[in-house]
Image (cartoon, coloured by chain):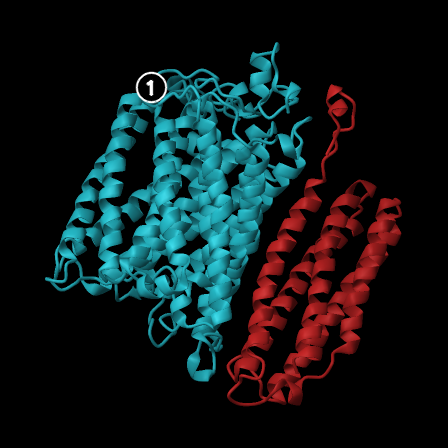
Chain colours: A red, B cyan
Amino acid sequence: MSAPSAIAGTPAWTLPARGRVGIGGLILAESAVFAIFVAAYVFYVGKSLSGPTPKEVLDLPVVVSILLWSSSLTIHVAVRALRGGAVQSFTLWWLVTILLGAAFLAGTGAEWHRLIYQDGLTIRTNLFGTTFYSLVGLHAAHVIVGLVLLTIVLILALGGHVTRAHAERADTLSLYWHFVDAVWLVVFLVVYVGAR
Amino acid sequence: MAVLDPTIAAVHRDADRPSVLAILHDWVVTVDHKRLGLMYIASGLVFFLVAGSEAAIMRIQLALPNNHFVSPQVFNRMMTLHGTTMVFFVGMPILLGFANYLVPLMVGARDMAFPRLNAFSFWMSLFGACLLYFSFLGAEGLYGGGTAPDVGWFAYAPLTARAFSRGNSTDYWTLSLLVSGIGSIGTAVNLLATTLCLRCPGMTLGKMPLFVWLNFVVACMILIVISPLTAAQIMLTLDRFLGAHFFDTQAGGSAVLWQHFFWIFGHPEVYVLILPGFAFASEIIPVFSRKVIFGYPFMVAASVSIGFISLGVWAHHMFTVGMTPAGNTFFAVSTMIVGVPTGIKVFNWLATIWGGKIRFATPMLFCIGFLFQFLCAGLTGIMLSVAPFDWQLSDSYFVVAHFHYVLIGGLLFTIFGAIYYWFPKATGRRLDETLGRWHFWLFVVGFNLTFAPLHFAGMIGMPRRIYTYQPGRGFELWNQLASAGVVFQAAAIVFFLWNVVRSLVRGAPAGADPWDAWTLEWSTSSPPPPYNFETLPVVRSRRPLWDLKHPDDPDWRYE
């Protein structure tokens, strides 16, 4: 990591930031949780004893997915703006991120409403319902947690409490948000594209 | 405030020291890694007595054939609570407590990376333990006092389905593991960040004490293996409360899937428990052999490989379920391979002792006991990894004997060694050596008397988890020997507790460095001040205190 010369008092002793390492650990643990839910989904594909099947009721959620993935871009722009000290630009892009996330959540809500009331698919209907709602619901729960955290930062920013000094913390939070978006990529590919 | 109020000021003058309530308040609100570590260990020891009593109840029940000391229902509850408590509320808290206390001191830091997360994690873990035992009262409301979880610590489906587990005892079990799992993950994140981000200048990864390395590996493993358990518990809760069908075979669900999910957690968990035991041994054995640890890079590499390989061995718990030949072969081979790095470690400890100037103090005695007994555990482990052998002996008392040799003969012995070794650091007083010897020898005799005969009971066909057995099948002798051993073990624990209480009050003062040791925790006072180090240390070798004591011949010349 560092040469012996670093010990003589030269400032070469640098260690990783604890925020990034900490959130990395959390992301590792969360990935394992999602891996188990994805494994259960894949294991039970085609094993439902009754309908409806994914082919009959699932539509590709292209628009809301693009909205969620673009929020990764906007939060990245927001953090970069904060690093440069542009607090107003940060607040704007942060707000856009929240709106995109909320739009995604509304899309999931509309999808679930249709599935439950039109197609009669609930968590107790069959194995597809069980695994679908738990996996997508687990992801939606993470989106909700992310939105709550982002909104707290937004409120602080609107109150004028967020400055360039907080860029590292905003960056740490953005890593969590990127993770939520990446998980959606996996869910999208497994549930809506691959295992229909 | 207090000064303004004359009555309170008077009370303070009279008492001359803070009231019990004030001390309690200090401990409850603390974010200091040392206090949290001690609370982890203390709570673990309390539940150790609880779960040990549960084991004693089972051994009394099994001492005689056709015994009616407890009912089958109570036996199942004791079995479930004993296993769950020992793994989650004894093993994990004690080991995380030691990691909490020692990792910041050993890397030369003033606290963990996230002190408040640390406090949160501890209280979550304790809350989980309370939930488990609250099930005695709450599982069936006011109707059925005394109903606790009875599905085994593995909780195989469909035992946990609503139809077979009425009331809420299984839900308390699920919730307690969910909640304490969150605590474990929090502490693992903390250990990870502390190890990577708070090392003092000069302490590169290659200069960290092995204790820190092993706990670093454990932290990474906790993140990967506790989460599947959390996920499986969420699924089980969905099944039980929302009518989902994950493990409901009548709707096409799979009971075997639960076994996979449980053992994906369950087997690496054994390594999460034993690696900290290796960590204790790797610190204690060199100090009491007066030698540098043999093969440091190999010890690190072996620890990391154990971490990786142990993630791919889980289905050796499921040979009897009936897997494909390819599955059986894979898991048999991976299980044999995980024995290789473990063997490397045993040889390195032996090589460390070899030619050393050995001091047989109590910590060293426990480590030597560990070496012998863990070797037995490893050998029976290799035997069980052979799938056909496992078909014969799976779910027999042979397996019970095997994993108690791992977790008591291996882990608990090193935990006792660690308590004798670091007690002076945490309290400023030494534990009594004579009482320590009584503790050690009684425990060696009691442990081996209990668990060695169970190998034979298993080999002649005694199944696990039965609450009684018929006379005349050859089980009597082995079970009576096993139950007799419990008396010795209990006596040993009495000596241990008496030693702790007595030494807390009037143990010999320890000084900063009672064992003439080499890692950073011994460079500060005993007990360490809240800030640990006045000035952050700078290290140049793996044994910074050796360098300090021997400036003429420092380690960094050779490393």
Image coordinates for residue B62, horizontal then vertical, percent: 18, 56
Image coordinates for residue B368, horizontal then vertical, percent: 36, 32
Image coordinates for residue B102, horizontal then vertical, percent: 51, 32
Quick check: can you spot residue A167?
yes
Residue B316, relative to residue B505: is it above or below?
below
Image coordinates for residue B208, horizontal then vertical, percent: 60, 31
Does B428 sit left or right of B146 as displayed?
right
User: How many discs appear?
Assistant: 1
Q: Quadrant of residue A118?
A: bottom right
Q: Amino acid at mark 1?
A: Gly
Residue that mark 1 sits on: B507
**Element type where label 1 sits in the image:** loop
**Point 61% across, 19% down: residue:** B555
The 10 Å Cα crowd at callout 1, few under 14, some 14 to 19, many 20 or more, is some
**Point 66% across, 22% down: residue:** B540
**Point 29% across, 43% down: residue:** B49
Front-most of residues A17 and B125: A17
Quick check: can you spot residue B21?
no
Residue B330, relative to residue B297: is it above or below?
below
Q: Residue most toward the top?
A: B552
Residue B527, relative to residue A72: is it above or below?
above
Image quadrant occupied by the C terminus of chain B: top right
Q: Residue most toward the left?
A: B472
Q: Please give the chain letter of the residue carrying mark 1.
A: B
